[in-house]
Image: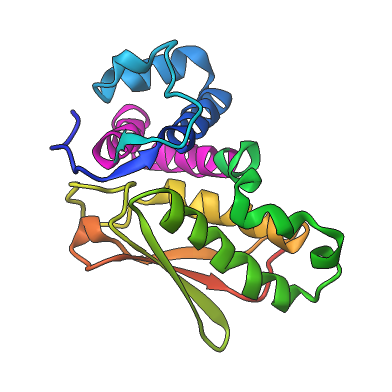
Amino acid sequence: MSPEKSGLYYPNKIARIYIMAMEDVMGKNGLNAILNLAGLGMYIDNYPADNLERQFDFSDFTALNAALEDMYGPRGGRGLALRAGRACFSQGLKNFGALAGVGDLAFKVLPLGAKLKMGLPAMATIFTNFSDQLSEVQEHDDHYTYTIKRCPVCWGRKTDKSVCHAAVGLLQEGLRWVSGGHEFRVVETECHAKGDEYCVFVIYKEPIG
């Protein structure tokens, strides 16, 4: 089930946070079934270490997400990956260094536009600094583009549609936290799995809630 190893890595801590988020979303038995289906049974009751060593291969992270679709179908898998992505941010990623200042009172009183302008690049910096994922943010008139080069969510996959739902969920929850409770529309417009060069997410500046 696992695609060929990529030689690119997430730190154990990010993989651990995501696996624990999956357990939170689908329960222990559901998670164990997914780990088995993904060829990652060695992680049952034995989650990656709580450290920043880069040891969790992108192909294994992809296998987790592909297994969600295989078990629950494209629609069900998408919903679970979105929820797991959101839980992943809320349960741990917000505590990473680059986002530490985003919780400060001085940040909280900034206008919404300034929060996005500072918060999105801070999120990208976490992944660029702590993993082999490269993330870039560009600002446009009514939206931002968040580009992932070397994507761990769809590594080695070949699909006819965008499949990086976990990344969408993570961005949605990150934006909600950065903005002080607003929801934003996040759309994956390009995906490496369907032949695009990079995975590109459009984030509209106007909140939807």
Task: Report the predominant secondary structure element of the magenta stretch.
Answer: helix
Residue farthest to the bottom, as pictured: 141
Q: Quadrant of residue 184?
A: bottom right
> Which residue appears at 21% of the width and 59% of the height?
194
Q: Can residue 69 be seen from the camera position used here?
A: no
Between residue 147 and residue 55, name the one nearer to us.
Answer: 55
Q: Can residue 137 be seen from the camera position used here?
A: yes
> Which residue appears at 68% of the width and 56% of the height?
176
Q: Quadrant of the C terminus?
A: bottom right
* Residue 60 position (above or below residue 196): above
* Residue 175 position (above or below residue 111): above
Is 80 on the left or on the right of 34, as rendered?
right
Residue 195: % across, % down: 18, 63
| Colour mapping used in the image | rainbow
Q: Quadrant of residue 71?
A: top left
The magenta stretch is 58-87
Q: Quadrant of the N terminus?
A: top left
Between residue 183 and residue 44, name the one nearer to us.
Answer: 44
> Which residue appears at 60% of the width and 56% of the height?
98
Between residue 121 and residue 157, name the one nearer to us.
Answer: 121
Q: Is residue 163 magenta?
A: no
